[in-house]
Image: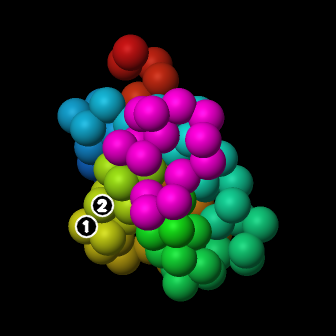
Amino acid sequence: MSDWDAILKEAEWLAEQFLRLEVDLAEAEKAGDYYVSKRYSDAAMAQYLQLMAQNPPPRSRHSQCHFQNLWNIWQQWNPSLQGEDKARAWGWGVRMAKARR
């Protein structure tokens, strides 16, 4: 059973980080989708964000900064949550940040 208090606490922290670092929230949402698609693999998510931070797609000159910030957030984030609950916290963090913009 999910611990919604913990999920929302982590989501709040993530939302603050996304907004403070001016992360592209569409990219944050895509990263969360990637995490789910990889069956909540922390290693796969870290590898994806590192790769995108070092060699982003040529969409815009801001992409590298956005992915670098996402990678930094992921590295700093140490929730007690795992798997699906961790993905929920990430998703709610994105939603909260969108609501505050």
Element type where label 1 sits in the image: helix
- Point 44% across, 58% down: residue: 53
How many residues crowd around disc 2 within 10 Å: few (fewer than 14), some, or many (20 or more)?
some
User: Can you say whether 93 is above or below 7 in the image?
Assistant: above
52 horizontally vs 41: left or right: left
29 is within the stretch colored magenta = no
Residue that carries the numbered disc 1 in the rendered image? 76
**Quarter of the image containing the N terminus?**
bottom right
- Three-letter amino acid code at the position of disc 1: Gln
The image quarter in which residue 84 lies: bottom right
Image coordinates of residue 27 in percent, x first then y, are: 56, 41
Provide the secondary structure element on which disc 2 rests: helix
Q: Would you name the residue on which mark 2 appears?
A: 72
Provide the residue span drawn in magenta.
Answer: 53-66
Of residues 25 and 77, the one nearer the viewer is 25
Q: Position of residue 20 (x, y in %)?
A: 22, 34
Residue at coordinates 32% horizontally, 70% vertically from top-left? 75
Q: Quadrant of the C terminus?
A: top left
Place of residue 16 in the rendered image (x, y in percent of width and height, measured from the top left): 26, 38
